[in-house]
Image (cartoon, rainbow, N blue to C red):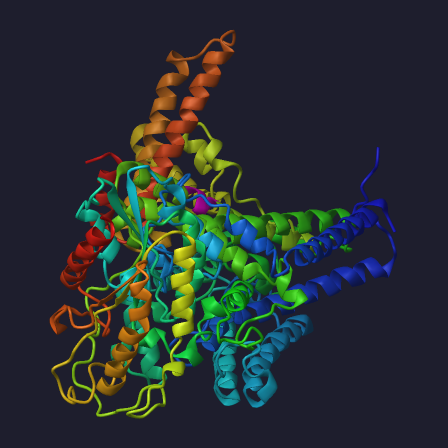
């Protein structure tokens, strides 16, 4: 064998060895409790080179929205403006958590609930300036909200506003969403700490294998992190983080005469079918952070179309939603007596014309109606 | 000092020859198969079989039209028949995969047509090839006929209304709705580069410079797998020289080839693909706010297209190098060149050289015989050359303007250089001034090229003007 051939072979063998060693080392470090990818997520160009995003990253059409969906909560929070704004002494910091309605589906940032509240330039009685941060995320699950809140409380909130709806409550659906499943270790920790009814060994909570923990196994997560950083340039250049089409399919007004809700039939909607334990955990979490909690039963479309005597909208048969409101009122009443929890039932606040493509997504005007009411609540709480 | 071992000097008797023959056979078969494998699926049925077959058919017909053997009216020798049988066998073999369920979809994305259709097509190609050999072969001047036919085909594929009409016709042949036809229906992989190689061969034949090539050598040259998609564009005589040189797999070439492949892969799939996310395109051009961010998008596009294309070239050069073929380089640090002429001598070099050899030089030679001034000759030569290069990318106003942009730029630089040559020389004792002028030239050239990309990257004139306006705060 000539020197050159030997040299090429040696380079190839060295390169392969290095590649394998790097992957093994990464997999050993990248254990769920101390994820290497998650650690990388804390490194962000947002709030340094690019401005922080006004809402958590989420996007189905990255090329148009300059945004993408990923599972790395560290990277998601690091890209948010909340991570780049030190709390000022005169700031009354309001964190909004909830589903796609809070995130602002089909709404520009300035039209979301947080955008509308900030535009009002509210002040509390003691002169602090109200600054609302949008931490909504387009998934309907209280456990997902709790996961977000568990990160958010580190940012010194003065008030947490949690917008909920019945669709986020079914106990057996708490772990079905990918972002919950891919943050299995954090969810298990929440289950253990708050004695939630979800099982920590639920197979929905993913446990990555050794190979999945290697650099090769984590290539999607790593690529997502890199793409999120790169899309920051376009977010900065356009201030667009959602592609809003000119037309969309409006939410159903004419409905099927289906009375069932998640397999349940009237009149049975037992309380233990709903994840009130998660709601309580969130209340405790906010209290531990020294922040009052305002729980808002978010507005829903109340249809006046076909079969609207049976159903309020596509999501909810009337009986189930009525029962849910009843349970919410009863459950939260003792909590509100404690003084740190407030409940605002805004279910019928917004007329049906002000909903867009779903029974919870609001138009800018609908969002404004809700924001006006929330402003009143915030003023009262901030006294 | 360590001396490198040259494979051509390694004498191991017949084994060296055997390796060369094996290498050539492998390149031939793999390149023919790659034409099918690399072709993406299309909405028109079986087109991912027929278009690659058409690429091979064009290669065979042009080989026949340029073959001295056929021109002399000699009978086809065994080697030619064997090469033809291999090509026909591969085509029929690919078509036959429709009957082998586990392998269906292995070569073509969608099920190929019937064996009978493929056999009829092969018969027609054989007749056309023999006809071309008998008719065009003895008359080199007639090679303009296939050149014109190829140009017509290129225009059909590059001009959207014609492409759409072509797609409608193809749909009709497959019993599909012609009304659904779109220009995106016809994505003939590699045709742009196959066109250059075929025209090269025809023009070299007309000039009497084309070396005699066997059928398998010619087909390998035309559809050479590493350079099929994005070049570089090699000359037939140079390619043939490598193909006929003694070959053994050897350390230096393999090492260098792997290095180029690794570099190209990194450039294309890491750097270019990441930059592509923020590079100028139709969507973000309309939405960008502020001049600074608009510049960022345009700079990103300039880098993206360089790393993308340069990466592909590195991979092609690297793969070919392992097999002993030294494809021409396509890029030589183009953005660091101090003027536009040097830029075009280092950007997509094989394309620029092709146009220089087969268009610019013949044109300017022809114009010199008339009473034209040098300025007029240079103007017409450079502007029309660059216009054609622009239109080769696609027959649209934007590509035409991009071509004119560079043509006028080259003309202005040429005249300026001519003017400055005797009047504005910097004395050698002032090296700093020389460096400053050179750096200024690099900056100006880079920005001229980068502003040109605005025309290249966007689909219409109005949007391009809007972006140019944004860049300058207008």
Residue furthest out toward the top: B429
In the image, A343 versus A111, the foreground residue is A343
In the image, A82 versus A162, the foreground residue is A162
- Left or right, A165 with reference to B267: left
Q: Position of residue B434 (x, y in %)?
A: 47, 15
Note whether residue A135 is visible: yes
Q: Position of residue A181 (x, y in %)?
A: 50, 70
In the image, A311 versus B155, the foreground residue is A311
Residue A337 counted in the magenta span: no
Q: Quadrant of the N terminus of chain B?
A: top right
Q: Position of residue A149 (x, y in %)?
A: 41, 59
Q: Residue at x 25, y 81 (%)?
A: A321
Where does the magenta region start and end? B302-306
Residue B305 counted in the magenta span: yes
- Left or right, B28 with reference to B2: left
- Left or right, A26 with reference to B469: right
Residue A45 image-quadrant placement: top left
In the image, B301 versus B8, the foreground residue is B301
What's the magenta bit mostly, secondary-structure-wise? helix
Q: Residue at x 35, y 53 (%)?
A: A291
Q: Residue at x 26, y 50 (%)?
A: B287
Q: Position of residue B305 (x, y in %)?
A: 44, 47
Q: Would you place residue A333 above or below residue B329 in this image? A: below
Q: Would you place residue A128 above or below residue A262 in this image? A: above
Q: Quadrant of the C terminus of chain B?
A: top left
Note whether residue B235 is visible: no
Q: Would you place residue A86 above or below residue A321 in this image? A: above
């Amino acid at each position: 064998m000539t020197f050159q051939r030997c040299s090429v072979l040696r380079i190839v063998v060295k390169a392969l060895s290095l590649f394998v060693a790097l992957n093994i080392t990464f997999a050993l470090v990248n254990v769920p409790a101390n994820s290497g990818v998650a650690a990388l997520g804390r490194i962000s160009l947002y709030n340094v080179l690019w401005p922080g995003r006004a809402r958590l990253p989420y996007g189905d059409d990255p090329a148009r929205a300059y945004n993408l969906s990923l599972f790395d909560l560290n990277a998601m929070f690091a890209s948010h403006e909340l991570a780049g704004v030190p709390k000022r002494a005169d700031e009354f910091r309001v964190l909004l958590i909830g589903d796609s309605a809070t995130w602002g589906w089909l709404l520009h940032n300035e039209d979301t609930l947080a955008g509308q509240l900030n535009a009002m330039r509210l002040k509390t009685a003691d002169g602090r300036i109200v600054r609302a941060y949008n931490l909504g995320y387009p998934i309907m699950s209280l456990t997902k909200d709790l996961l977000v809140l568990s990160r958010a409380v580190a940012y010194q909130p003065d008030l947490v506003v949690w917008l909920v709806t019945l669709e986020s409550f079914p106990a057996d659906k708490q772990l079905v969403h990918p972002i919950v499943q891919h943050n299995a270790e954090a969810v298990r920790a929440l289950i253990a700490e708050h004695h939630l009814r979800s099982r920590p060994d639920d197979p929905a909570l993913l446990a990555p294998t050794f190979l999945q923990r290697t650099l090769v196994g984590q290539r999607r997560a790593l690529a997502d992190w890199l793409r999120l950083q790169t899309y920051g340039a376009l977010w900065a250049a356009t201030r667009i983080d959602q592609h809003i089409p000119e037309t969309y399919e409006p939410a159903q007004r004419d409905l099927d005469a289906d009375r069932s809700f998640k397999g349940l039939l009237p009149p049975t909607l037992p309380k233990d079918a709903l994840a009130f334990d998660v709601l309580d955990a969130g209340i405790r979490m906010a209290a531990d952070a020294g922040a009052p909690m305002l729980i808002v039963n978010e507005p829903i479309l109340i249809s006046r179309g076909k079969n609207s005597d049976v159903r309020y909208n596509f999501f909810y048969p009337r009986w189930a939603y009525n029962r849910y409101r009843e349970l919410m009122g009863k459950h939260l009443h003792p909590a509100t007596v404690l003084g740190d929890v407030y409940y605002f039932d805004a279910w019928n606040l917004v007329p049906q014309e002000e909903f867009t493509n779903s029974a919870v997504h609001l138009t800018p005007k609908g969002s404004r109606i809700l924001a006006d009411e929330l402003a009143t609540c915030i003023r009262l709480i901030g006294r | 000092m360590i001396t490198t071992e040259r494979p051509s000097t390694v004498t191991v008797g017949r084994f060296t020859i055997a390796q060369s023959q094996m290498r050539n056979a492998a390149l031939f078969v793999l390149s023919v198969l790659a034409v099918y494998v690399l072709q993406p699926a299309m909405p028109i049925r079986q087109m991912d079989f027929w278009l690659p077959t058409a690429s091979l058919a064009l290669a065979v017909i042009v080989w026949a039209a340029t073959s001295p053997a056929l021109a002399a009216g000699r009978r086809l020798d065994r080697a030619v028949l064997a090469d033809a049988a291999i090509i026909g066998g591969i085509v029929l073999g690919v078509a036959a995969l429709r009957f082998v369920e586990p392998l269906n979809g292995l070569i073509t994305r969608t099920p190929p047509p019937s064996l009978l259709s493929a056999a009829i097509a092969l018969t027609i190609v054989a007749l056309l090839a023999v006809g071309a050999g008998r008719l065009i072969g003895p008359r080199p001047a007639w090679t303009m006929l296939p050149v014109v036919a190829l140009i017509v085909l290129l225009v059909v594929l590059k001009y959207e209304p014609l492409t759409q009409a072509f797609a409608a016709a193809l749909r009709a042949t497959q019993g599909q709705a012609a009304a659904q036809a779109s220009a995106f229906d016809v994505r003939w992989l590699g045709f742009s580069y196959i066109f250059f190689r075929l025209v090269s061969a025809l023009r070299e034949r007309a000039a009497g410079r084309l070396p005699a090539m066997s059928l398998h050598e010619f087909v390998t040259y035309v559809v050479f797998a590493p350079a099929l998609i994005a070049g570089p564009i090699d000359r037939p005589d140079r390619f043939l020289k490598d193909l006929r040189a003694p070959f053994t797999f050897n350390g230096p070439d393999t090492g260098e080839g792997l290095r180029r492949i690794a570099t190209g892969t990194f450039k294309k799939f890491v750097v270019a693909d990441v930059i592509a996310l923020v590079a100028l395109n139709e969507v973000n051009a309309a939405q960008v706010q502020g001049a600074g961010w608009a510049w960022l998008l345009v700079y990103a596009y300039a880098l993206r297209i360089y790393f993308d294309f340069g990466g592909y070239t590195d991979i092609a050069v690297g793969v070919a190098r392992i097999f002993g073929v030294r494809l021409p380089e396509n890029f030589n640090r183009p953005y660091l060149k101090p003027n536009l002429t040097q830029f075009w001598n280092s950007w997509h070099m094989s394309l620029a050289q092709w146009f220089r050899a087969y268009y610019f030089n013949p044109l300017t030679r022809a114009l010199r015989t008339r009473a034209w001034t040098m300025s007029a000759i240079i103007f017409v030569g450079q502007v029309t050359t660059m216009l054609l290069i622009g239109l080769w990318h696609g027959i649209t106003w934007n590509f035409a303007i991009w071509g004119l942009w560079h043509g006028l730029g080259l003309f202005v630089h040429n005249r300026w250089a001519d003017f400055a040559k005797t009047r504005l020389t910097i004395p050698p004792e002032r090296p700093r001034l020389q460096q400053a002028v050179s750096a200024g030239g690099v900056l100006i050239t880079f920005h001229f090229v980068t502003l040109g990309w605005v025309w290249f990257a966007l689909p219409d004139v109005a949007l391009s003007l809007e972006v140019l306006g944004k860049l300058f705060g207008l």
